């Protein structure tokens, strides 16, 4: 029987790459996302390229009722989840605390913290019942340190880091592994979303840097998930070679 992975926020970036990485290793895939057209496209690509079964769930992790309904009404065979990747997350805006946009704050808190909690609260009992599982939380270097104008985003990723540690303790007696994945500069939709669609600003973030790719992150997650049952990789910080901290980066000259 093929293993099953559930990936939230799988319509692009890390989530899409993670789904493809595990599908390539013959996992059946549950993908979730808000953008139905993109979700359906990813589903079709996974099925065609890897010949695995794919269940696409169109809902917003920020909505508790939608999350519960989508995950608890899955056919029984899909509830035998081996790996959960809490990937859905975002940065919105880059402002000082005194000038911050409250809507940006709400969006980040609701997605990065509450969305992760809603999904974990629903899936963890399934794993406990099945007596197996591995939970991955996608954090950030912003969850290890703070930087100017990153205030609320950094706070949400610090929360993810704390929740990962706490979840590991709670899952310990059930034999369920928990891993935190904390990327540095990775060129995905991340900065486009942060800058509210301004692609020029987003490109400048990675100028002169060989940034991480979504596939880089996916490969690390698969490696951690594929370790023997007695091995848990607890915490991984991944940066480009040109990045030492959240803000210390050596860029190539133009």
Image (cartoon, helix red, strand yellow):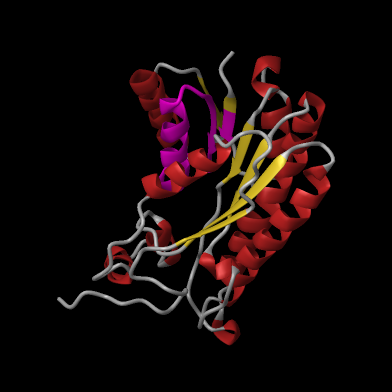
User: Front-most of 246 and 87?
Assistant: 246
Does residue 7 belong to the magenta stretch? yes
Which x, y percent locates residue 123?
A: 72, 35
Residue 5 against residue 182 in the figure, above or below? above
Does residue 207 belong to the magenta stretch? no
**Which quarter of the rendered picture does the C terminus lie within?**
bottom left
Considering every residue shown, the one lying at the far right of the view is 173
Look at the image and give the residue range highlighted in magenta.
5-33
Residue 20 against residue 186 in the figure, above or below? above
Considering every residue shown, the one lying at the far left of the view is 254
Which x, y percent locates residue 37?
A: 41, 33
Whether residue 172 can be seen here? yes
| Residue pictured at 56% horizontal, 17% vertical | 2
Whether residue 58 can be seen here? no
Considering every residue shown, the one lying at the far bottom of the view is 98
Q: Quadrant of residue 226?
A: top right
**Which quarter of the rendered picture does the N terminus lie within?**
top right
User: Front-most of 181 and 30?
Assistant: 181
| Residue pictured at 69% horizontal, 30% vertical | 71
């Amino acid at each position: 029987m093929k293993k099953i992975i559930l990936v939230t926020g799988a319509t692009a970036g890390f989530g899409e790459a993670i789904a493809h990485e595990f599908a390539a290793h013959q996992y059946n895939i549950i993908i979730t996302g808000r953008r139905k057209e993109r979700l359906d496209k990813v589903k079709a690509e996974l099925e065609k390229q890897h010949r695995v079964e794919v269940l696409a769930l169109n809902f917003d992790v920020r909505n508790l009722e939608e999350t519960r309904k989508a995950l608890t009404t899955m056919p029984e065979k899909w509830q035998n989840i081996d790996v959960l990747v809490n990937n859905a997350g975002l940065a919105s805006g880059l402002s000082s605390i005194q000038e911050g946009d409250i809507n940006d704050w709400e969006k980040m808190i609701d997605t990065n913290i509450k969305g992760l909690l809603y999904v974990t609260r629903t899936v963890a009992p399934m794993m406990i019942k099945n007596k197996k599982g591995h939970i991955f939380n996608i954090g950030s270097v912003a969850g290890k340190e703070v930087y100017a104008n990153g205030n609320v985003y950094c706070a949400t990723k610090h929360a993810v880091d704390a929740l990962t540690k706490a979840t590991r303790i709670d899952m310990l007696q059930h034999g369920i592994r928990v891993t935190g994945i904390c990327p540095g500069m990775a060129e995905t939709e991340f900065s486009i979303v942060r800058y509210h669609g301004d692609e020029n600003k987003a490109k400048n973030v990675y100028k002169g840097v060989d940034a991480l790719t979504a596939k880089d992150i996916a490969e690390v997650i698969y490696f951690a998930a594929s370790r023997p049952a007695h091995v848990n990789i607890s915490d991984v910080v991944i940066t480009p070679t040109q990045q030492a901290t959240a803000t210390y980066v050596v860029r190539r000259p133009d």
